Image (cartoon, helix red, strand yellow):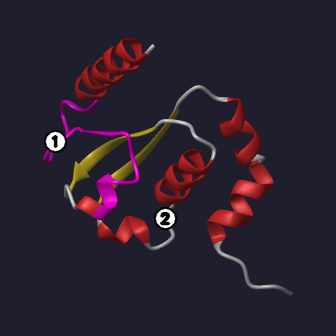
Amino acid sequence: AEMRPGFEVVAEALGLREKIAAADYVITGEGNLDRQTLDGKGPAGVARLARELGKPGFAIVGRFSSETEVSALFDGVFPLDETPPFTRTAELLRNRGRELGSRLISRA
């Protein structure tokens, strides 16, 4: 047996490198984007892989701590900033999706 980081195993099984290489943009998500994200969580791995492959990477997140080291992983972070009881999640996701779409169109 060989010990490997979980993200590497999942990314390899999904062919994530090839999929990101073929993409124009990379969008990932996280409930709470903060310093813990850097400790092997999927969104950080996705962002690093996108950066390595020269692809713009964005995150749509529940909450964002705005830490420099975390935000530096992404070309843009779009927080929902919704508090319980989470009654507006669908509306906020649509709004952040529109914001992201506008940013992508302006880059083209």
First reached walking from the N terminus: tag 2 or tag 1: 2
Residue that numbered label 2 is attached to: 41
Q: Which residue is mark 1?
A: 82
Badge 1: few (under 14), some or many (20 or more) residues near its Cα, within 10 Å? few
Q: Do labels 2 and 1 touch, CB within 8 Å?
A: no
Residue at the outermost right position: 1
Instruction: Identify the image quadrant of the N terminus.
Output: bottom right
Instruction: Report the amino acid beneath label 1.
Output: Glu
| Crowd class of label 2 (few under 14; some 14 to 19; many from 20; radius 10 Å) | some
Q: Please, what is the three-letter code of the amino acid marked with disc 2?
A: Lys
- Residue 90 drawn at (x, y percent): 29, 26
* In magenta segment, residue 102: no
- Direction from residue 19 to residue 32 in the image, left or right: left
For the C terminus, the image quarter is top left
Image-based side of 41 in relation to 97, left or right: right
Q: How many marks?
A: 2
* Rendering coords of residue 10 (x, y %): 70, 59
Locate residue 97 relative to residue 1 in the image: left or right.
Answer: left
When asked about the image quadrant of residue 38, the answer is bottom left
Segment colored magenta: 69-89
Q: Nearer the viewer, mark 2 or mark 1?
A: 2
What residue sits 53% from the left and 55% below the top? Answer: 48
Question: In this view of the protein, which residue sits in the foreground, 86 or 57?
Answer: 57
Residue 80 within the magenta-colored segment of the rendering: yes
Quadrant hosting residue 59: top left
